Amino acid sequence: MLIDVGQYLFRVNSAPSIVKNNLDLMYGDAIIEDSLAPADFTVSLKHDSLLRKFLKPQVTFYLGSNSPFKPLPASQSYPVMEWGMNWCIAATDFNRLIVHAAVLVKNNKAIVFPATPGSGKSTLSAYFALSGWKLYSDEMAIIDLDTLQVMPLFRPVCLKNESISLVKKWFPQSIFTGIAKDTQKGDVAHLRVNSFAEYQTFSPVDVVAIVFPKYQKNSQTEPYKISKIAGFEKLAGNSFNYNILGNTAFDTIQRLVEQTQQVEMNYNDLSDVDDLLTSEFTL
Amino acid sequence: MNKQKIYSDIENLVFHNEIPTIELKQWESIIHVLREVNLLAACYFRLETEDKLTLLPSFALKHMKSAAVYSSRQSEQVTFECKLLQKILDSESIPSVFLKGASYTLRKSKNSQGRVYSDIDLLVAKKDISKAEQALTKHAWCSKKVSEYDNNYYREWSHEIPPMFNIHRGTVLDLHHNILLPISGREVNVELLTENCQSIDGGYTVLGYAATILHSIVHLIINEDVSNGYRDILDITTLIKENDSPEFWQEITLLASKLGFNNELYLALSLSKKYANLTIPNDVWLTFSVQQNNSKLNFLLNYVYYFALQPHSPAVQTLKHKIAINIVYLLGHLQKMPLKILIPHLLTKSFFSIRDQIFGKHHFDK
Amino acid sequence: MYYLENSFKTYYPTDGYGVAIFKTDSRDTIFFQGPNDKLKKLFELECFDLPKFQQLIACELPDAVQLIDKLLLHNIISQNKRT
């Protein structure tokens, strides 16, 4: 099967049927049997050793014949497939700057939310995506080195632990995979927020702000501007391929921080964040 | 698409810079195979030299370019590391020679462009190994964690100590005192190899070109693992083409003779001829009359090595490739160690492999 | 005496605060806080001694020493004259 995630085409050579079912659920019409286009990656998820297959089944993700991760319990098959796909992109695309961040777009303007600890960016991504924003990615901001525009990706949101039940509560109609328990990130489930048809209306857009949210249970939603140098340092620290791109990344991030505003924000209510960002950046 | 056709397109692209006229979809196999064998970046730079990048479909160009960015970064990093390493060893007055990948990068040979490699290889005299190890440890280099068995293997039998890595940057360094296992009985007279060393820009020392190429050949042929074989043959062919001169041919044939590597040189030159159509002077071929009449050697050449070195990718591999690879695996081990040591070594290695098969490779990792 | 190396490039944000330095040899990126007019003056020098440094950066001695250590560690300055 082939999966069109927008910027990349994945060929899935083999995977357990539970994974294929979840891929169907998450990607819908983005899955095609065949294409005239060449796939960027050939991936597979295979069961590991002989004995383990019967006692404690494990799966390993492969890009071609190479496996970047340790084998993981078969109960985590679907997250492993998604993390494997993330890895393929982050480990091979050095034509763009790839930042570990969520990207949400409203009115053709993008806000990048780097994945700093305690940011709650996945929950934020899910909330915003189901509240009128367009999700360009919950995990990686793909930034064109010349135009500095951010590219849309068609991938589900990865939610963890309490976020799963929270989002289900807020959006009872939402489309989720089953929950994979006890992964290295805790309980994990994936959420589809758009149809492929909706996604296909998304196009590259300019970034207006880099926002560093911090979920604080009893706080008010308070934004404050931070210095560009602090913004630069955090962006660089969150870029997957900063070190590879070196000089180019330095220049790109420099132009990006000059072109955008950098804001830190404590919050405890996502709808406040939505309102605040919408008015602040006239979206 | 037919595996033979895919392979043939790859061979033409890699060795002759010929861009295949195929449908866009057929580029998928080619790019995936090149990625598997780490030749995407090399192809990029070779096509760039011939101004052919615009002839590539954007799908192929983007993947090759991305790989080229990665390899450029690596070569910058290696250059930086070697500068620091040279400083450390100079301060302790330890003479050293950079080998393989690092030497190509430092001397900027044609095959260095796009070449990706995981370790820096450095040769020092056997008597200086401990001193070098200590000096490196003072500068944040640590020995990699290997199993106790492997640690003994390295120190007692091998021509290198266990790999060292830099705590701050993660770079891996292989410190050698020779290029073949001493125990195999085919210990190289390392002085012959380092006889015509070259000093290059930056104050580094590398082997002369004949020794460099011969080292690469020996490393390729007397090795059980030929997963990088295709890239190695490309290295060898490119280096020979870059240094093609009567003096060079004289030097390499003489050196091979002195070191007892005539068979290996013959095999490598014949393979270069098969893959890359390399032109070898007639008088050089004449020195190989013994090898040319050796039917076993020629069988190995045409039916084993020719297939075993081709890209280890399911897109081009057939049963004959797999059989060839297995034969090379066995031969490689046999050449490196006499049987009485090989069997316990293989048995121990096999025990670990079987154990890992059953319990999973990382079960015993701490 | 400390000498400025020449293997780096700088970015002074337009909001007037801090500098990011990209070292072209090690490919490291190093950040410094502080008003950029002072930092600009510092990085334009060929060399400086501790008193001059303190005067330029306007900081206490312990901070000055710490800063100099950081500059030395990342090879932005050295105690050897550049040949």
Image (cartoon, coloured by chain):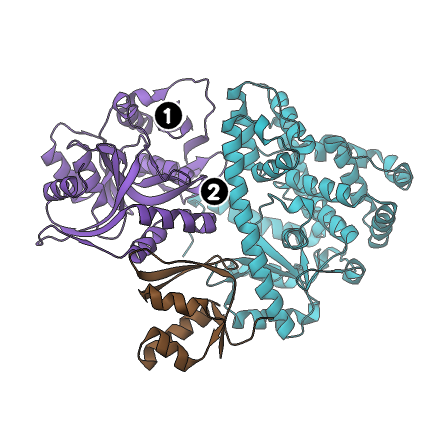
Q: Quadrant of residue A180?
A: top left
The chain holding disc 1 is: A
Q: Residues within 10 Å of mark 2 (few under 14, many from 20)?
A: some
Numbered badge on residue C44: none
Residue kind at label 1, given as amino acid type: Ile
Percent coordinates x, y for residue B345 in the rendering: 62, 52
Q: Is residue B216 found left or right of A281 in the rendered image?
A: right
Tell me the quadrant of the picture where the C terminus of chain C can be found.
Answer: bottom right
Q: Nearer the viewer, mark 1 or mark 2?
A: 1
Nearest to the observer: residue A107 or residue B356: A107
Say which chain tag 2 marks. B
C-alpha distance separating marks 1 and 2: 31 Å
Color used for chain B? Answer: cyan
Which residue was labeled with disc 1? A3
Q: Tell which of C44 and A134 is nearer to you.
A: C44
Residue A47 in the image: state x and y as whole percent.
Answer: 40, 35
Chain with brown colouring: C
User: Does residue B162 appear anywhere in the picture?
Assistant: no
Q: Is residue B345 left or right of residue C36?
A: right
Residue appearing at x 51%, y 44% in the figure: B354
User: Mark 2 highlights which residue?
Assistant: B357
Among the 4 quarters of the image, the one containing residue B181:
bottom right
Left or right of residue B221: residue B77: left
Percent position (x, y) of residue B319? Answer: 62, 27
Indicate the secondary structure of the residue bearing disc 1. strand
Image hue for chain A: purple
